[in-house]
Amino acid sequence: MVLPLKEDDTYLVLNERGFAEAGAEGFYRHDTRFLSRYRLGLPPGLALLESRSPRPDHLVQDWARFGGPEGELYLRRTLRVARGRVEEVLLFRNLGREAQEVAVVVEAVPSFQDLFQARGWHPSPPPERGFAYRAPDGVEKRVALSPSPPPGGHRLALPPKEEGVLGWTVALESPLGTQGDLPSYEAFLAAFPQGEGPWAPVLRQALLDLRALLLATPEGPVPAAGIPWFVAPFGRDSLLTAFMLLPWGKEVARGVLRYLARRQGAALDPLREEEPGKILHEERLGELSRLGHVPFARYYGTVDATPLFVVLLGRYLDLMGDLALVQELRPHWEAALGWLERADLDGDGLLEFAPKGGGLAVQSWKDSHDSMSHRDGRLAEPPLAVSEVQGYAYAAHLVARDFYMALGEEEKARRHQKRAEALFHLIQERFWIPELGTYALALDRHKEPLRVKASDAGHLLWAGAVPEEQVGDLLETLLSEEMWTGWGLRTLGRREARYNPLSYHNGSVWPHDTALFAGGLFRYGRKEQGAQVAQALLELAQSQPDLRLPELVGGFPREAGLPPVPYPVACRPQAWDAAAVVYLYALVQGVRAW
C-alpha cells in the first residue's frame, strides 16, 4: 500500500518505508513528477518500527537499532509537505553509553516527467535531466535541496544518551498554478460533526482526507479528485463531492461553483470538446497538456458536469437559503441550461454525447472505453444517451424551476417544470425494461437500449427520476445477488457478458456510486434499506487498514471475516469517496432529507 501525502498542489506518493523508489512513486506538483526517486541511506542496522500519518500532510516514523534486547540508536523521522516544498527532519537519540557518529545519505533523482508519462500512458523523456528543467514552452521548474547534501552525506556526532537533529528542505519550484488560501485543518474539521460510535474514526479520517485534497484557488477551495492520478480540479468529481459535503461544507460548494463558472465553456473547440455553456471536465498544468499533446489543459469532455453544476447550486440554495449566490451565478446556470438543450443532438428530448476530440470516448461517470455494452457484449456506438445523465438533467430542470420561482419569474419556472415532466416521461418510456426490473444502461446511436443490469439506475433513484410504483421492482433488482456484493453495488451485473469483478467499470464496486444509491433510498423513504447500504459502506471503510473508502474494490461476493478484494491501482484518498462517508453519516442522522 502506498503512503500518500499532500498539501494544496504538492503531493508525494511513497512506499511503505516512506521512500520513492519504484513505479509511480515520487514527488509531484502541477501534474509533474519532480523526483522519481527519493530515499535515505540511514545508519546500518536501523529497522522501521512504525510508520503513521497523523494528518495527510505529514508522516511520522520510528526507527531503531538494537544490540541484543536493548536499543542502541533511535530515530524519529518527520516528513512534512507544504505548497511547493517538503521538509525532512531526523531526530537521532543515542541510547547507549558510548559516543556514536551517524551519517545519512540523501538520494534524490529528478525526472520532470509529465503525469501521463509517469503513468506510462505517453513516452517518457530521457532520464538524464538535471535538477532544473526548461520545457519547450519556456516554463522552468527546479528541485532544490537546502542545505545541499555534503559529499558522503549529512553527519552528526552523538554523545552518550544525547540527541541531535538533521534536517533539510526539498523545494519543488514551479511558476504555474494559482494562489489562494485554504482553511486550517482545525477550522475545516470544526465545521463538520465529529460522528458517534463506529462512525467517529472513519468520519475523522474522511474529513482529514477531504481537507488534504483541497486545492487553493482565487475562487475558493476546490477538491482534487484523488491521489495519485487525479490531483487536479475535475468538474463531475468536485460537484458531487461538494454536494455530499453540504450543509457543512458550504465554503467548498461556493469554491467549486465559482471555479467552474469562471471556466465555463464559451467557444466551440472540438479538440477540447468545449461548447458555450458547458462545464469543465478537468484542468491540467503538465507539459503534455500545455503543449497540446493531450487535450487536458482545459478539457470539456463530460456530459454530466453541466447538469450537476445546476443541481449543486440548487442544493446549496435549498440547504443554505443563499439566493445571493444564485443571483451572482445566474449567467452561468442559464448558460448551462442552454447547453442542456443543445446537448439533445437528434431532437428526441434526451442528452447525448458523441466524442469529437482526442480525449474520452465515454463521457459519463463510467468513462472507460468499454463501459457501455449490450447484453451480448457488443460495445455501443455513439452518440450515446446514458441513463443517469437524463436523471441529472431532470433534476436540473426542477432546480431551474425553483430558481425562477424564487426570482419571481413564473413563466420561466413553468417552462422548466414542463421540460422536467417531459424528460421524466421519456426516461420511463425509453429506458425502463420491465423484464429486467431496471433501467437500460444507455441508448446507442440507433436508440437501441443497452439491456444490462448496472448500478446507474441507482443514480436515477438519487435524482428522483423513478416513479413510486417502479421503486419496488428496481430495488429487487439492485439488491439481488446479481448486483449486490455485500459491500456495495456492482457497476455491472455478474451475469452480463462483460462482467469482470476486477474491471474498472464492468463489475467492480465504487463506494461513491453505492452512496448515491443510498441517497436515493432515503429520498424515497426506504430508510431501513438505506441504513443497511450505509452500514455496508461503513464496514468497508472499517475493513481497510487506513479506514478509508478506496476509489473502488473488486466486485466479488462478500466473505465473512475477510475484507473486499482490492483493486490494485485504486486512488486513496479519493474525494467523492471521502465525501461519501460524510454524506452517509448525514443520511443516517436524518440531516440530508431532500
Image (cartoon, grey):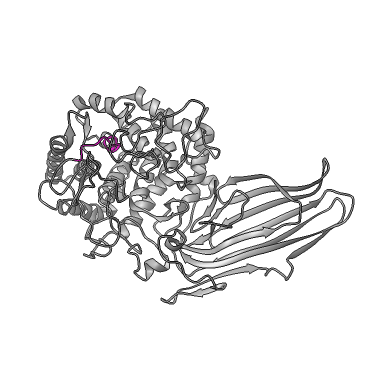
Instruction: Give the mark count.
Output: 0
Above/below status of 444 relative to 484 = below
Quadrant of the image for the C terminus?
top left
**Picture coordinates of residue 514 (x, y %)?**
36, 35
Name which residue lies at 35% across and 62% down.
296
Name the chief secondary structure element in magenta: loop
Describe residue 385's horizontal placement relative to residue 492 as left or right: left
Residue farthest to the left?
A: 347
Q: Can residue 337 be seen here? A: yes
Name which residue lies at 32% across and 27% down.
479
**Picture coordinates of residue 423 (x, y %)?**
15, 40
Q: Nearer the viewer, residue 103 or 256?
A: 103
Magenta includes 452? yes
**Picture coordinates of residue 1 (x, y %)?**
54, 46
Q: Nearer the viewer, residue 52 or 235?
A: 52
Give the magenta range.
450-459
Name which residue lies at 42% across and 59% down.
217
Magenta includes 186? no
Above/below status of 314 relative to 172 = above
Q: Nearer the viewer, residue 333 or 579?
A: 579
Residue farthest to the right?
A: 97
Q: Can residue 246 be seen here? A: no
Describe residue 527's horizontal placement relative to residue 432 as left or right: right
**Picture coordinates of residue 458 (x, y %)?**
29, 35
Q: Nearer the viewer, residue 72 or 575?
A: 72
Above/below status of 151 relative to 385 = below
